[in-house]
């Protein structure tokens, strides 16, 4: 758990509502119905909160693609590689988020997205496939 003050990126009305909902909870306590009320939390979470609550969004939406169509797309967008070609640099937020997820966690997200890519009505299938490949690529040695 990232801590009550590290749930969302800012204190705007939407982030406050999200923080109030998730504050003091465990990731596995959230129902799909409640998660569907807060799909933008995936974007508004701090990197630490995303890492903590992501399993809730993934496990509850897995195989429920018709009902949760935006949720797996928003998850995919959190891990998508820069799209401007080889010259594109990740943002500071992307770098921070990426650093928090170890290879096993990235592979778990890739497996989730692979299941999503098999669904009939996938949003931006090619981007999903690029993101899977990105997640499966080991980080360069330092």
Image (cartoon, grey):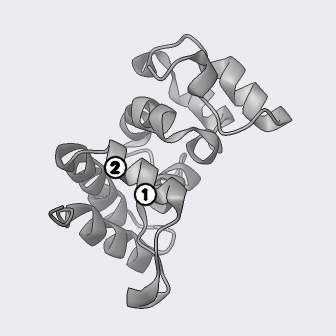
Q: Residue at x 52, y 18 (%)?
A: 3
- Left/right placement of residue 18 relative to residue 142 reads right
Q: Picture quarter containing residue 36?
A: top right
**Front residue of this view, candidates 26 and 82:** 82
Circle 2 SS class: helix
Q: Residue at x 41, y 59 (%)?
A: 79
User: Mark 2 — residue?
Assistant: 99
Q: Position of residue 63 (x, y in %)?
A: 36, 46
Q: Position of residue 132 (x, y in %)?
A: 29, 66
Question: CB atoms at circles 1 and 2 under 8 Å apart?
Answer: yes
- Outermost right residue: 13
Q: Position of residue 130 (x, y in %)?
A: 34, 75
**Front residue of this view, candidates 114 and 67:** 114
- Left/right placement of residue 8 relative to residue 102 reads right
**Front residue of this view, candidates 136 and 99:** 99
Circle 1 SS class: helix
Q: The N terminus is located in which quarter?
A: top left
Q: The C terminus is located in which quarter?
A: bottom left
Residue 95, numbered circle: 1
- Outermost top residue: 24
Q: Position of residue 12 (x, y in %)?
A: 82, 36
């Amino acid at each position: 758990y990232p801590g009550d003050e590290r749930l969302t990126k800012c204190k705007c009305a939407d982030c406050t509502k999200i923080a109030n909902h998730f504050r003091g909870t465990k990731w596995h306590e959230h129902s799909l119905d409640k998660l569907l009320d807060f799909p933008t939390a995936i974007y508004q979470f701090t990197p630490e909160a995303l890492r903590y609550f992501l399993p809730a969004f993934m496990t509850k939406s897995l195989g429920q693609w018709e009902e949760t169509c935006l949720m797996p797309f928003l998850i995919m967008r959190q891990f998508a590689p820069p799209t401007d070609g080889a010259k594109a640099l990740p943002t500071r937020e992307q770098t921070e988020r990426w650093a928090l997820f170890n290879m096993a966690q990235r592979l778990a997200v890739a497996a989730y997205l692979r299941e999503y890519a098999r669904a009939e009505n996938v949003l931006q299938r090619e981007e999903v496939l690029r993101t899977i490949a990105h997640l499966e690529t080991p980080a360069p040695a330092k």
